[in-house]
Amino acid sequence: MTATHCPYCALQCATSLVRGSGAAPVTVQPREFPTNRGGLCRKGWTAAEVLTVPDRLTAPLVRDAAGELVETTWEHALDVVAERITALQTAYGQDAVAVFGGGGLTNEKAYALGKFARVALRTANVDYNGRFCMSSAAAATNRSFGVDRGLPFPLTDLGGAGAILLVGSNLAETMPPAVAHLAGARDAGGLLVVDPRRTATAQLTEEAAGIHLQATPGSDLALVLALTHVVLQEGLADTAYLRERTDDPDALYRSTAAWWPERAERVTGVPAGVIRQAARVLAGAAPVHGGAGAFVLTGRGAEQHSKGTDTVTACINLALALGLPGRVGSGYGCITGQGNGQGGREHGQKADQLPGYRSIGVPAARAHVARVWGVEPESLPGPGKSAVELINALGTPDGPRALLVHGSNLLVSAPRLASVRERLASLDLLVVADVVPSETALLADVVFPVTQWAEEDGTMTSLEGRVLRRRAAITPPGNVRSDLAIFAGLASRLGCSASFPTDPAEVFEELRLASAGGIADYSGISWSRLDAGEALFWPVPAEDHPGTPRLFADRFGTPDGRARVITVEHRAVADDLRSDAPLYLVTGRLLQHYQSGAQTRRVVELAEAEPEVFAEIHPRVAAALGLRDGGLVRLRTARGSMVCAARVTGDVRPDTVFVPFHYGGAAAVNELTNDVLDPVSRMPEFKACAVELVAVAGA
Ligand code: SF4
């Protein structure tokens, strides 16, 4: 039996892998751990099936003269890639080659990817799909607190709270075992859910007099400003906390003064009385009023907007007004989505960061990391382009001409897919390392088959900032290697003298050194501590340090230790409603699928449960279109169109259409989404754009 963690989301439920026989090399059993308390969701229970999917990649593939991907040896595939990289960089410079990573890669792979880009390729063009996930929350918490750790407290702290405000998070479907931690607040009537859909999570509010604030898409910022207004105007704020622990309490009053609930009602559609009631429930649970504790939590619904950073900032400001961050049993946190969404943004695969969550523009940070890597600080490139900007530059006269993709399925998960497809097709070289022939891999010139969760050792960092040990239980099939072997094989062929270890434990030792003294300090986490079963919260600055479950008890990570009050204003959705596109398109997740669906669409039980894309449409809208439940509907936005089955349901607002994004090809809703970016986080606006619906005749 091997103790490890689920391959999917950031809850990283603890599992045991039991040796199987025949077609199933292992079976998954839940394991007791504070976050999942012995529970798993359907994805976790069926995860072993991904190890044996029929179309698993088992040998490198290189596209031949006839345009077919054909099997070859690792030596040949690595030679081809190295030769083409060398030729392109010789002709067009170092930045002609770009690397794209993923929030599902282990810490070791994320670290090695960033080092490979900056030391072996010496390109500034490296970024990852975390830009599509929780980058707005990361930007906001860095701005307000000076530190970004998704939950700066253990998840189990939620259990004692009297009220929890969830803004744009559908925990009950995305990470079901986490729902147990909401039970205390739910039973106390303190569960407050902001979502344009009556999701499974929103339905929890109906069990014990909680509140579902069913705001119109793109209006969360206005709603939270109004909640803060009520807290401040009704004398519910923790004024001593604001005075002692924030830099500018007056700014908070000024910036929310005009957001009385009646004004917010006109923007959000949420009745003013409900806004007042929600603010009072949340405030009543705050420690300043003798409550059991209160939390404000955000998910992708708040974050995936062109104003996502400001929306999260408004949520942080609300938490500050109530004196929550840094208090035991209260706080603000982001529910990170991807399996290693937290660790993935700490170790240097982001365009503007170096390991240890260091900024690439800071001379001392560059000097420290350069010393660990054995290179001159001056040789390290500066900040590169963020994900969407990088994709949009591919194949342009001054942009990268080659792209290496690890752990990402861009042709499903990126916005405005027609443009992504065009940019990828314009490249001189596209290399994809993956487990299965994903939509993106099928477009590549070279495909590397790589190891996956139960076949490899490594570490993942959960949504709590807790470093967890992933353990190999089985031998990978065929001719499969780790991404670490790809970085090592290419680096040596490119003439790079820096070392690229292929043993995850060795990479982790180096990562510890590189992170030492940084914000995300792993230096005290040894492989042996992890092997002994410790699961430590960073920062861990010494080997005898117990880890840091709770941050901000005495000070925030800003120079003066005070949280920054950043004032923010509501603004409209970038592609807002108009007469020929009168509804909001919202994308999101399903219980049965994970991210681009490349893994879960191949698991029979999950695929059978949710085999096809669909659009949730309100009955009033369906009636006006003459559309029946199950009938086909065409969705059209300024960027593209698609046809799918209608699910007619009163669970969505009449101004909202919901489509899950887990499907590829003609079923990919990201053909329609908007790639306009948040100016701070560079997050695309996945969550709201104007859409027109047309019933497909005869359907
Ligand atoms: Fe747990 Fe997430 Fe895996 Fe489900 S997908 S079992 S919630 S880690």
Image: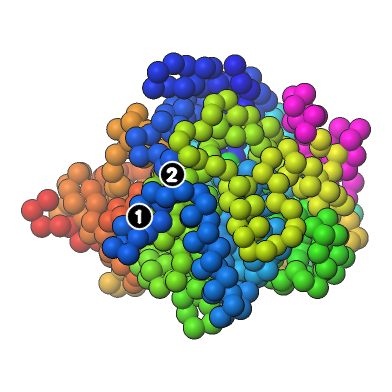
The segment highlighted magenta reads: 527-556
Q: Residue at x 35, y 49 (%)?
A: 663
Q: Residue at x 53, y 56 (%)?
A: 78
Residue 212 position in % (x across, y down): 49, 43
What mark, if any, has residue 69 been given in the picture? Answer: 1
Q: Position of residue 683 (x, y in %)?
A: 56, 63
**SS class, disc 1:** strand
413, 17: nearer the viewer: 17
Q: Which residue is mark 2?
A: 59
Residue 621, compared with residue 528, is above or below; it is: below
Instruction: Choose the circle earlier in sequence order: 1 or 2.
Output: 2
Instruction: Report x, y in % for residue 334.
Output: 64, 47
Identity of the residue drawn at 27% across and 56% down: 666
Q: Residues within 10 Å of mark 1 (few under 14, many from 20)?
A: some
The image quadrant of residue 669 is bottom left
Q: Is residue 219 above or below residue 160?
A: below
Prevailing secondary structure class for the magenta stretch in the rendered image: loop
Instruction: Decide if residue 215 is in sight here.
Output: no
Q: Amino acid at mark 1?
A: Leu
Q: Does 572 sit above or below residue 278?
A: below
Number of marks in the rendered image: 2
Q: Is any atom of residue 652 visible in this view? A: yes
Viewer-proximal residue among 369 and 545: 369
Which corner quadrant of the image does residue 291 belong to? top right
